[in-house]
Amino acid sequence: MANKSSTESEGTKAEAQKAKAPGEENVIYVGSKPPMSYVMACLVQLNGGAPSVTLKARGRAISGAVDVAEMLRNRFMKDALKVKSINISSEQLEAEGGRRKNVSAIEIVLEKK
């Protein structure tokens, strides 16, 4: 029975990877979790053979995304990772009461040297 559950979990992982949109495989969305959670997610992607990883965040989570990128660059993958690009933008969200609200967003692309 242990084999059955391990194959089921492998199938679930494969389905989850297929469910992602093309080009979204190596995207980590930074939110309210501790930064080390996102650092570990990035390390898993990069050590799994991905040539690059993209950190995306909006609003108050932007500083957390910058922290994650700096932790990766300076502590965990020193001299093995570089910042390929940083894109900043604004997104319009609908707030309570139907009002439109601008929210800042950032996308940081890190790649192996």
Image: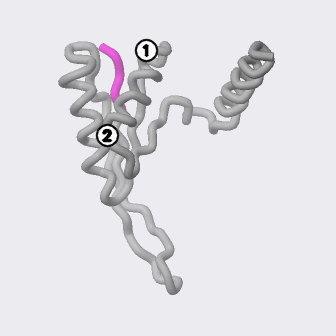
**Secondary-structure class at tag 1:** helix
Residue at 34% over, 48% down: 106
Q: Position of residue 113 (x, y in %)?
A: 30, 13
Quadrant the N terminus occupies? top right
Residue at 29% over, 36% down: 68
**Secondary-structure class at tag 2:** helix
> Outermost residue, front direction?
1
Residue to which mark 2 is pinned: 35
Question: Which residue type carries mark 1?
Answer: Asn
| Above-or-below relation of 51 to 63 | above
User: What's the magenta bit mostly, secondary-structure-wise?
Assistant: strand
Looking at the image, tell me whether mark 1 or mark 2 is earlier in sequence order.
Answer: 2
- Which of the pair 90/63 is nearer the observer? 63
- Residue 47: give its label: 1
Is 39 colored magenta in this rendering?
A: no
- Which of the pair 7/97 is nearer the observer? 7
Over which residues does the magenta segment extend? 109-113
Colour logic:
one colour
Q: Where is residue 43 in the image (x, y as percent from the top left)?
A: 39, 22
Question: Which residue type carries mark 2?
Answer: Pro
Q: In which quarter of the image is residue 66?
A: top left
Q: Position of residue 50 (x, y in %)?
A: 47, 18
Q: In which quarter of the image is residue 54?
A: top left
Q: Position of residue 104 (x, y in %)?
A: 34, 60
| Residue 103 left/right relative to 27 | left
